[in-house]
Image (tube, helix red, strand yellow):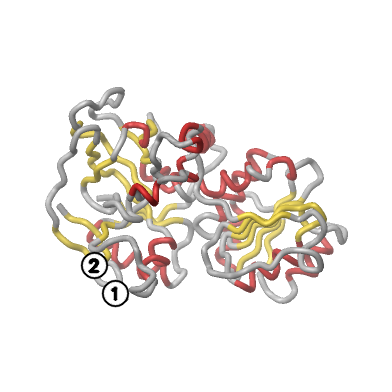
Amino acid sequence: MKAIQYREIGKGPELVEIPTPEPGPGQIRLKVTAAGLCHSDWFIMGLPAEQYAYGLPLTLGHEGAGIVDKLGDGVEGIELGGSYAIYGPWGCGQCHACAQGKENYCTRAAELGIAPPGLGAPGAMAEYVIVDDARHLVPLGDLDPIETVSLTDAGLTPYHAIMSSAQKLRAGATAVVIGTGGLGHVGIQVLRAVSPVTVIALDISEEKLSLAREVGAHHALMSDASAVEKIRELTGGVGAEAVFDFTGVQPTLDIARQVVAVDGDIQIVGIGGGILPTGFFSTPFGASVRAPYWGSRSELIEVLDLARTGSVGVHVEQYTLDTAVEAYEKLHKGEVRGRAVVVP
């Protein structure tokens, strides 16, 4: 089968031919209907050899959906021919976090060698993918996999961050969204769907700010030296009760620190590598700083339910496996509007 793999440290993704995998006991094979590209892929491909720990070759694609075409021995409750989304942050299934469906915070995954598809295990950027357990599949029903596959990360991750700050998202409050690309433009929609807050969007791209306006941002500002003053003006000097940084580079974290309100939340979602100092004389009194990771299985179900009502959608650019390397190049250059999806 065709697959997109990372095969050599320091080089980009490659289109290759590899054997079609067979499901073992308890496993499920999906014929992939859609796979999403993510900046996280480039993050791991950009790591030096001494920091890279995901194995080579690595089939990419931690956002995946497909049709069940083969079941391993002992699999129950999964429909052959059914359409499913893959819940990506695989855990042990037995620790306290996993018992709550929060496998994104599994305490044993690393020691047991459990890794998400595309981030250690073979991913969905291929014609077929193996899912390790039935609990990691969520039925799509009549949802279009191409339109919704990105919600398994680009929807789930913002939703998890936003819902963990739900108590701050009251009427009259303000939320700042920094970075309105793949995750940020979905985060704006989630905020509008689940809360009454005023949403201020920041980006360095006018095209992405235009997308932010399209999906519901009340204000869209350039993320430059004037952003802090403008946000302070829009909030009457109070600042934002919640700041969601989907970029995570040092300049955006510096903005987040300067615009968060007293007793507000800063959620660092992006993995841009910036560091935010916190404490007295650094962040306002009572302000909390959090680095959330992905989301729970139940939250993915909720995100897909938002998609069913039309409250949340993803702006998608479609590619084939043959053009996926080109799509990764566009993503690396910041030229993808919304989310890139490969349709095998």
Residue type at the position of mark 2: Arg
Q: Residue at x 33, y 73 (%)?
A: 49
Q: Label 2, on which residue?
A: 7
In the visual, does 25 lie left or right of 85?
left
Residue 320 relative to residue 180: left or right: left
Is 25 or 94 nearer to us in this picture?
Answer: 94
Residue 307: % across, % down? 50, 37
The numbered dot on residue 11 is 1
In this view, which residue lies farthest toward the top?
A: 77
* Residue located 32% across and 47% down the image: 34
CB-based contact (under 8 Å), mark 1 and mark 2: yes
Whether residue 309 sits left or right of residue 327 in the image: it is right
Counting from the top left corner in percent of width and height, residue 17 is at 14, 59
- Residues 282 and 128: in front is 282
The picture places residue 212, in percent across and down from the top left corner, at: 60, 56
Q: Nearer the viewer, residue 154 or 134?
A: 134
